Amino acid sequence: MMFLMNYYRKPLLITLCCLFSFFSPQTFAESDHCVLLVYHRFTDDGPKSTSVSPELFRSHLSYLQDNGFEVLPLDKVVKALKTKKTLPDKCVSLTADDGYQSIYDGAYPLLKEFQMPMAVFISTQAIDQHYSSMMTWAQLGQMSDLISAYNHGVSHSHLVDKDTKVIVAEITDAQKRLEKELGVKSKFFAYPYGEFDDITYRQLQDLDYVGFGQHSGAIGVNSDWFNLPRFAMAGLYAKMSSFALKVNSLPMPIASERPKLMMIDAGNRPLLTLKFSRPMNANERYQFACFVAGQDNPEINWIGVDKVTVRSVEPLSKGRSRYNCTVPSKQKGRYYWYSKQWLAKAG
Ligand SMILES: [Zn+2]
């Protein structure tokens, strides 16, 4: 009898333990999140590094539709996260930068078919000067049932090492044109090339904009509102083989990162310190993995249960580099994803 009691008690204990962990606050704290994607061109014959074919874009939208994702407008996602309102567990928001004509020709017909919204960040000068590769204000207006236009600067200038006056004019003059032509009110700004220096970052804060970058990861309530990650969808990065992993990703539970900004000198091995918003359990600490493109995996050092440092094993070269880090979550096939972008000036 004793044997039997023990025999039956064990599965129950396991069940109770699993129920307890399933309903623990850790699971629910992670419920408000969304994944942003950034496209550029929707064409078969554009540069690979910025294009997806309409056929592949259709596969993306089909995957989202067939797998229970809600594709929400960008302003709705930002508002929900800022006011701590609930979002669907499978949340995606589509964006495209620059305002190429192929959005009108290649993407919009598919967005219509699937009834999915998209945010388009445009550089106003290219539209004002009627560049043939860009959409017109009239076309942007025609698509307003599903497409919302936002700010990508006046001239698509790289906002690094620029005079404050130039930065402010790039942002505010573009916003005035958007407001005049399309009635845009939301102050959303996508950094040209996804890059900025400390001055540009501070200007975005002072001018009260939400900033969008081009690095990987999901967004959540603790995200940096002046540098929200968006998964780049072009070339190899847009393939279906990795699409599911990206749109299912969750925000890494991070309370703070140091350094917060991206500028470093070339030849540096920058030390990144991440403070988590909750203790990471032994398994999570063990499975926390980072990589740096083109070199061996970086050094990872845990300081207690909620702080880790990451440092590349080789100096970073001039230009853009990233530390990408993931941890499997309790939900099968879903990873916490975090990316730190660095921008190295010549040393
Ligand atoms: Zn751009």
Image: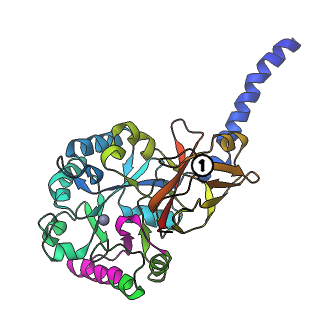
Please give left or right for residue 237 compared with residue 113 in the image: right
Which residue is disc 1 drawn over? 298
Kindly tell me whether mark 1's CB lies below 8 Å from ligand 1.
Answer: no
Q: Residues within 10 Å of mark 1 (few under 14, many from 20)?
A: some
Image check: 242 left or right of 42?
right
Q: Position of residue 173 (x, y in %)?
A: 29, 83
Q: Identify the residue at horizontal 25%, vertical 62% (top origin).
A: 147
Identified by mark 1, the residue type is Pro
Residue that lies at the very extreme toward the bottom in this rendered image: 165
- Above or below 13: residue 118: below
- Camera-side residue: 57 or 4? 57
Where is residue 77 shown, x and y percent of the image? 43, 61
Query: Callout 1: helix, strand or loop?
Result: loop
Quarter of the rendering occupied by the N terminus: top right
Number of numbered discs visible in the structure rendering: 1
Q: Is residue 262 left or right of residue 77?
A: right
Residue 97 lies in the magenta stretch: no
Tell me: residue 130, above or below residue 92: below
Is residue 189 highlighted in magenta? yes
Going 18% across and 73% down the picture, which residue do you hit? 127
Q: Position of residue 111 (x, y in %)?
A: 23, 52
Q: Is residue 86 visible?
A: no
The residue positioned 32% from the left and 73% from the top of the image is 151
In the image, the segment drawn in magenta is 170-197
For ligand 1, which image quadrant applies?
Answer: bottom left
Left or right of 143? Residue 34 is right
Residue 144 figure quarter? bottom left
Front residue of 8 and 40: 40
Whether residue 236 can be seen here: yes
